[in-house]
Amino acid sequence: MNIDENIYNSMKNIIFIELCNFVDYPLGGHLTFAKHLAYAMQGDLDLVGISTVVSEPLRQWYYKDIEGFRYRLYNVSWIDRNITKPLVPARITSFFHFRKCIKELQLEKYEHFVVQTPEILLALPKKYLPKVLLVMPGVSNPLSISRYPYAKKFAAFYDKIFFKWASHVKILLAAADKKAISEFVERSKGVIVLEKVVQFPTRYDGNIFKLKDKCFLRNKYQIASNECMIVTTGRLNWFKGWKLMLDAFSIFEKKHPNSCFYFIGNGEDKERIISYIEEKKLSGKVKLLGYLSLDVIADYLNMADLFVMGSFKEGWSTSLVEAVSCGAKCVVTAFSSAEEMVENGHNGFVLKDRNESLFAESMSKALLLPLENVQEASLKIRRLAVQNLKEDFLKYLNK
């Protein structure tokens, strides 16, 4: 990281504005896409974000190496990452911080805007909206699934304002299945036309998430070859359905006593999950591994006998894309995109009912699925590798 006196003479014609630090905060689909785009574009766009490091510059352009490339970066605010649930959501405070910086950012000089956070879209002056490519990690109303109880009261109002602003953007790239996209357009009540929304699945790093030697990895991590490994990845949050997964596992492990359930990820529900594990008498059978590097996550997905997800809502799930690419047999709830990656009875099961007994039964059935089925699914999903992102992205940007 360094400040260069020529930095104001090196601006690109594309600006990507996102409420993240483009490195490791906040965890989730928004950050994953931001990092993938930074990797794919190889420094060929400017970045506006937030900082989690006190020593980094605020409200001024500087250079920073991100995903192996040098980027011109502008932080609108600083976030204390140790506060997991602030009184006012960070996305709301960042809205006002961004509004204060609009003049300093010299937005009028950019030809293209890339936005994926709704609050940033709403903060942009209306005259810039026709230049915006809006990336949507999901098409659900974020307030309807917010962890802040009072937020749900404003869901209808949010839709009204969001659709009004979104109707003016150049194009919407939605990481969701076709059914969810149709429901999204219908929810707009004619404000958004279907032709303006393009299905744009979540990408993954094909150099990391790929088929590997399971026996070699089990030896490397000293995990017994006869252990039945169940793995889930993602944020430790209620809407990821951790209670359903633990309830199902408590049934499953009675039939498969050599099983162990690995949670990979961090989140605000960690202590609640630990308490529930003790309540279900699953201590020693469930392991919370916390945040792991992508290489290690890929290793665990390859070692897994089963990958599970109990989410209430998802866009085009990054966790599921990565699991399928690593050849995991999957048992997941019927969130958006699940049925486009998991074929019932082929490489796993998609469950429409949130029932722990059915979930546990499906886990047992999935263990018996042929290995060649999941290998076939892994090869099929290679089209979503991040290595193909730049070409696909520029196609819509220049449309």
Image (cartoon, rainbow, N blue to C red):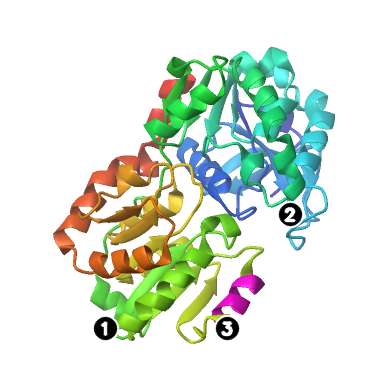
Q: Mark 3 falls on what kind of element? A: helix
Residue pointed to by mark 1: 225
Residue pointed to by mark 3: 278
Could you say which quadrant of the image residue 395 lies in?
top left
Main secondary structure found in the magenta portion: helix
Tag 2 near tag 3, CB within 8 Å: no
Residue type highlighted by circle 2: Thr
Residue pointed to by mark 2: 52
Give the left or right position of residue 180, taking residue 358 as reference: right
Q: Position of residue 90 (x, y in %)?
A: 76, 47
Q: Residues within 10 Å of mark 1 (few under 14, many from 20)?
A: few
Could you say which quadrant of the image residue 179 lies in?
top left
Of the two numbered discs 2 and 3 in the rendering, the one whose residue sits closer to the viewer: 3
Q: Mark 2 falls on what kind of element? A: loop
Magenta part of the chain:
271-277
Q: Which is nearer the N-term, disc 2 or disc 3?
A: 2
Q: How many marks?
A: 3
Whether residue 77 can be seen here: yes
Q: Which is nearer the N-term, disc 3 or disc 1?
A: 1
Of the two numbered discs 3 and 1 in the rendering, the one whose residue sits closer to the viewer: 3
Of the two numbered discs 2 and 1 in the rendering, the one whose residue sits closer to the viewer: 1
